[in-house]
Amino acid sequence: MNDIEKAVKILNQGGIIIFPTDTAFGIGCRVDREDAIKKLFAIRKRPRDQAVPVLFDNKETIKKFVTEIPSDVEEKLMDRYWPGALTIVMSCLTDRVPVLVRGGGKNIGVRIPDNETILSIIKKTGTGILGPSANFHGEATPYAFEDLNPELVGLVDYVVPGECKLKNASTVIDCSGNEWQIIREGAIKLNL
């Protein structure tokens, strides 16, 4: 069993994995496993009112979790920057997105990362994978395998080896309202 197959098996059983993306190492579980999501928040010591991004491998799957993808968002942002280091916040279907994932709100941050390893894992899992950085809340973001906190590594079910080519956080843009707003400027510089 290779790394990807092992990661998929663990995710499908409700496990937690650490994995490389294009930006940084992430820690995740299936978006449809509330037991795993609660465990993930506990492991990371993340405040329950802070939403986490969800990684996908295609727009069609994203459409199952959001109220709609406005055509201008799809054309200007998704088609131009995905796969890539842009997280887009949109209104979500609250009955499909667990409350912890959305931080108690009504939005979800979504991204299609530009990393073949995690894209293969997501594709074989068949749903979105939570994708916050693989660190304890408030600690430095791990951009290389050596940056991972050994204590955190000891709390997860599997670590997928690999490299993060950008070594920079994703840019986050909130498109849930009428006015788009850049929440965090990261690897992608947006000219709106």
Image: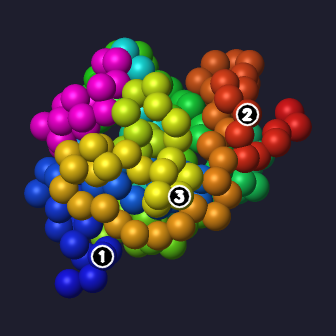
Of labels 3 and 2, earlier in sequence is 3
Q: Which residues are magenta?
A: 33-48
Q: Secondary structure at mark 2?
A: loop
Q: Of the residues tagged 1 and 3, which is closer to the observer?
A: 3
Q: Which mark is residue 144?
A: 3
The residue that mark 2 highlights is 185
Rendered image quadrant of residue 5: bottom left
Which of the 4 quarters of the picture holds residue 49? top left
Q: Dot 1, how many residues are within 10 Å of its Cα: few (below 14), some (14-19), or many (20+)?
A: some
Q: Identify the mark nearer the N-term, 2 or 1.
A: 1
Of the 4 image quadrants, the one containing the N terminus is bottom left
Q: Is residue 46 left or right of residue 22?
A: left
Instruction: Specify whether residue 88 is painted magenta.
Output: no
Q: Amino acid at mark 2?
A: Glu
Give amino acid for label 3: Ala
The residue tagged 1 is 3
Measured as percent of width and height from the top left, residue 120 is found at 41, 72
Q: Marks 3 and 2: CB-CB under 8 Å?
A: no
The reply to whether the C-beta atoms of the residues labelled 2 and 1 are less than 8 Å apart is no
- Mark 2 vs mark 1, CA separation in Å: 32 Å
Identify which residue is drawn at 37% across, 33% down: 136
